[in-house]
Image: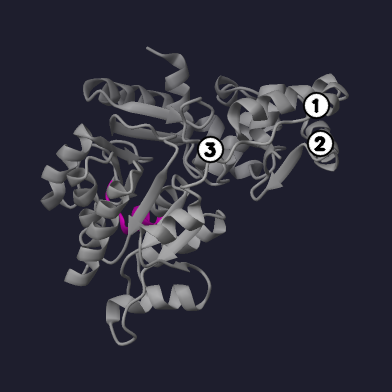
């Protein structure tokens, strides 16, 4: 059995820890396996852990549960993505609360150069379905080949998946439950087609119940894994608006199709546009303009002269950012094995020299 996978799964199973504290544990302890062997007196000193959570970590019995999950993974040929793995979605690495572990059935590049989410009401009108289908068809006609992400729900979600499949786009359905079931059951046949030309993605272990709260949690994956979220139709309240808010908090682009002022399922979109929480979209050209799809932007090269003047530790950080594009400070801490205070000082100096740029969520990238 793969011991690394065992611990990756096990840490995600520890009760009341969650992805944010799980990442802190690994960063401060120094290794994944070490989290399960560390002494309580050390754990209580880690920010965000304290006495109660330290007891839970020490007394947990998640290893056996993780072994059973590996059996399920092997039986159904699933893929796993741990947040420190190279193939973990880079866009999600930028999100402080992204899942520590993802499961997928299917085959799709989660780091495709173009990924967009299309979301909306479960009670989609014919108008909503038609503009969703037209957008995806027009994207194909313009020569783009993005991955289309949605949530497999009724209405706009399922229309987005169907239109993506009809245009031979890869599509990802982000689920609010484990991969042992499909919800809603009525979309099982579409889910099977998605597996053949995309993937079913979830952070939830097998046998997880499809609780209402899970679908709110999955919305952050839909928002974070994409370059932009496009709201097709939405009432004044709903999951699509939650996803749009999350996308804004991640500094992602948000688009919304406008509708008539007296249409119930245009109210949410119109309000997003009116409050400047979404850009108005009428056609694929709007998407191209804001996302820069027609431009060939090349990353700025770091001047060799400046690079040669850096210390060895600064060069180490720059080399990591060259390789991974964007990294959270905790991941830099793990990969460099330097202290947080030392890394903070190095990053500040690199910012002053115009080499590194600070992004939200303690994420850094090269200028």
Which residue is tagged 3?
56
Badge 3, how many Cα within 10 Å: few under 14, some, many 20+?
some
Which residue is tagged 1?
314
Q: Is residue 56 above or below residue 235?
A: above
Q: Is residue 154 above or below residue 31?
A: below
Tell me the distance, in whole angstroms, between the alpha carbons under discs 2 and 1. Answer: 7 Å
Q: Is residue 257 left or right of residue 71?
A: right
Which residue is tagged 2?
350
Quadrant containing the N terminus in the rendered view: top left
Local secondary structure at mark 2: helix
Q: Which residues are magenta?
A: 209-216
Nearer the observer, disc 3 or disc 1?
1
Residue closest to the eye, 332 or 71: 332
Residue drawn 54% across and 28% down? 84
Badge 1, how many Cα within 10 Å: few under 14, some, many 20+?
some
Local secondary structure at mark 3: helix
Quadrant containing the C terminus in the rendered view: top right
Q: Is residue 65 left or right of residue 350?
A: left
Residue 241 highlighted magenta (yes or no): no
* N-terminal label among 2 and 3: 3
Residue 216 in picture, x, y percent from top left: 39, 57
């Amino acid at each position: 059995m793969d011991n690394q996978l065992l611990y990756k799964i096990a840490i995600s199973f520890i009760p009341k820890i969650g992805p944010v504290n799980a990442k802190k544990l690994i960063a401060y302890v120094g290794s994944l396996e070490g989290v399960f062997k560390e002494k309580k007196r050390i754990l209580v000193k880690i920010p965000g852990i304290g006495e109660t959570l330290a007891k839970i970590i020490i007394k947990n019995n998640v290893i056996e549960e993780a072994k059973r999950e590996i059996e399920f993974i092997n039986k159904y040929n699933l893929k796993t993505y741990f947040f420190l793995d190279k193939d973990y979605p880079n866009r999600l690495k930028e999100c402080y609360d992204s899942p520590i572990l993802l499961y997928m059935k299917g085959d799709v590049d989660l780091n495709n150069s173009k990924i967009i989410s299309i979301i909306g009401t479960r009670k989609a009108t014919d108008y909503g379905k038609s503009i969703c289908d037209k957008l995806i068809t027009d994207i194909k006609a313009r020569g783009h080949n993005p991955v289309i992400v949605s949530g497999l729900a009724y209405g706009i979600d399922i229309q987005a998946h169907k239109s993506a499949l009809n245009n031979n786009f890869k599509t990802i359905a982000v689920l609010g439950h484990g991969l042992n079931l499909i919800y809603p059951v009525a979309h099982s046949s579409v889910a099977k087609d998605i597996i053949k030309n995309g993937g079913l993605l979830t952070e939830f272990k097998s046998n997880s119940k499809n609780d209402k709260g899970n679908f709110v949690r999955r919305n952050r994956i839909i928002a974070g894994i994409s370059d932009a979220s496009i709201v097709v139709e939405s009432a004044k309240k709903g999951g699509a608006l939650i996803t749009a808010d999350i996308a804004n908090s991640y500094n992602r682009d948000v688009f919304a199709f406008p509708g008539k002022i007296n249409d119930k399922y245009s109210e949410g979109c119109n309000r997003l546009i009116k409050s400047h929480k979404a850009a108005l979209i009428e056609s694929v050209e709007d998407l191209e303009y804001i996302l820069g799809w027609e431009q060939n932007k090349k990353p700025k090269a770091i001047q060799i002269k400046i690079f040669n003047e850096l210390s060895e530790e600064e060069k180490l950080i720059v080399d990591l950012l060259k390789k991974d594009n964007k990294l959270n400070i905790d991941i830099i801490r793990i990969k460099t094995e330097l202290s947080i205070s030392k890394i903070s000082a190095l990053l500040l100096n690199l910012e002053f020299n115009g080499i590194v740029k600070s992004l939200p969520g303690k994420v850094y990238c090269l200028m």
